[in-house]
Amino acid sequence: MCDSFRKPILSTLFTLAFAGIWCASICPAVAASETSVTTYHNDNFRTGWNKHETILTARAISGKGFNMIASAALDDQVDAQPLVVPNQMINGQGTHDVVYVATESNSVYAIDATSGQVLLSQNFGAPVPYYDLPGGCNNNGPNIGIDGTPVIDPSSSTMYVITYTLESNSQTFRIHALDLSTLTDKVPSVVISASGMLNNGQAYLFQAAQDRQRPGMLLANGNVYAGFGSYCDINANVSRGWVLGWQTGSLTPLPANHLNNALASSPDTFFLTSVWMSGFGLAANTGGDIYFVTGNSDYSGNTYNKKTNLSESVVELSSDLTKVKDYFSPNNVAQLEEEDGDFGSGGVMLLPPQSGSYPNLAVGAGKAGVLYLLDADKLGKQNNYLNTQSLGGCWCGESYFQSAGKIGHVVASAGYNVTVYDVRTQTNGKPSLVRKASSASVPNGQSPGFFTSVSSNGAAKNSTVIWAVSRPTDNDPANIYLYAFNSGGKTLYSGLAGTWPNTGGDSNTVPTVANGKVYVASNQALAIFGLGAPAKLPPTRVVDMRVPLASGEHEIHGVVRSLNGNLITVAERDGTLVTVDSTSAEQKSRMAEPSVGAGLLARGTTDASGIFHANTILHAVRNAAMWQPDR
């Protein structure tokens, strides 16, 4: 940000919604070498757009000179988006353009943004190993440490990050305020705790052993916010979604917090209403209100409530976390609940101000594959959307850019393609999304969807590039690739960007674009792309993440063919039909809700009649090539 405006802006606009790219409206134009990416998807609207990229034009990257030019070895899988700070002083090593990467081993790295040299790293305690997660949740790598993308406050050179550690054999979340130059705590870290009130007047306590901090963190209103969900929907009898906040600098918890599901009871003792969004960040508008999308709750389909359980909904929350100011719920909430059709598998993106009678818009999509265009000023309660588009399933989030004439474009990445929509506004009347272009299929053997970012030199012709990272198509070697498309969907580049061997959890990898470079963090590696001589990825190792089985216990994979009460008919990888009895798994709250056509992993024993009695049921991708061997 421009120095003359830095302090007042950070107390108002920057922390409200304009982190990063929107400073351009009040600051002089900045050179490409000065572009920062300090929060998930570039800004608090979550557009994923860097509009100051002068080097990586469509012509430049479609030639032979664009390659992976450097890489860095890391200690674990990376689920967080890399962040970039140029001209950053690193203690004892001078000034560098720095890319900051956080891993699931609770390590934070400061890496030279051009050479890939690790300048500094700090570890913040032993992560929680996969076998200590509820039910042996398989939606992750071998460890859970730093899961959500940190956020950086450039005015104070502080990174806010949440770690997940084993302390005295207890799972513990801590929020840290790190000095960018040393990666050490500026103030003592704070153990995360919270209490909410249920609708029967009883208190419900935050449970670190059951709740997962997955969404990207948000810096707004002089506070830091984070959302929490569950581990594979296991222990849904005690796991509930939260939004929590802390004051910047001191890390003092806000007086209030938001508990998404405040029901004291439900038909199946199944609560959740998680905030997970496949890692997408909590968003904020210019007034400081917070936006997010919630997931499923009880699979009876009967517990959605506009006051006590806003499941499957876009929620607008006041900055002090005391009031739900507005919400949007699709008209098929009951069906989504019954089919595990989380609206909250994707995030909500706010659009920059538009012309016409609806200046503030939002978009969001989830597992059902419907992209909703919403009035962000009046979400409209239930089913009051402006426009919809049919997509594939979205374990994903949207991006945005503008072209000549200030025409806005939404970039969707549901299913297996990048799709670009024009935002059509009217002086009097509702806006709409109009399909403009679609790309070739992006490889993906996991859940439908993937993540994009956009770079351009303002609205200059042929400067817009849409960047995407594929998901693996098998479990060995489980490669992921960086793709580049122009605004018309033409493929400009594809190249190996890393590996993702822990295929039970989706590769929600977000490419970061800044200053002529693209950064992709994956399993134990950071890849740096740019114009220059080609480089290679560092060697990595693969960890066998399968939970140890008890004597006589087995583990099977399959696709659900039918549901009949507690009996599930599953087609194994060779087509054999197996009947799975879910009674024990449900009674122990070790069951992620199965649905017809979805993949399933079950652990248990087989009786003399061939019935498989499951003590644990988890989701699995439908693609058998991603499954580990049965045992």
Image: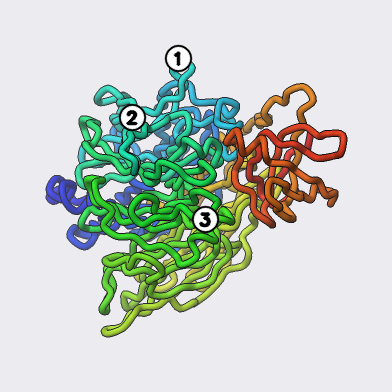
- Asked whether 480 or 351 is in front, the reply is 351
Q: Nearer the viewer, mark 3 or mark 2?
A: 3
Specify which label sits upstream in the sequence, 1 or 2. Answer: 1
- First of labels 1, 3 by sequence position: 1
- Give the residue type at disc 3: Gly
Mark carried by residue 193: 2
Categorize mark 2 by other alpha carbons within 10 Å: few (<14), some (14-19), many (20+): some
**SS of the residue at dot 1?**
loop
Quadrant that contains the C terminus:
top right
Judged left or right of residue 118, residue 546 is: right
Q: Nearer the viewer, mark 1 or mark 3?
A: 3
Marks 1/2: CA distance? 17 Å
Q: CA distance from mark 3 to mark 2?
A: 30 Å
Residue plotted at (30% across, 26% down): 190
Pointer 1 residue? 168
Q: Amino acid at mark 2?
A: Ser
Q: Counting residues from the N terminus, which is met first, the one under dot 3 or under dot 2?
A: 2
- For image coordinates 57% across by 68% down, the residue present is 439
- Which residue is rendered at x = 81% and y = 34% of the image? 606
For mark 3, give the secondary structure: loop
Residue identifier under label 3: 301
x and y percentages locating residue 369 in the rendered image:
54, 64
Give the secondary structure at mark 2: loop
* Disc 3: CA contacts within 10 A as few (<14), some (14-19) or many (>=20): some
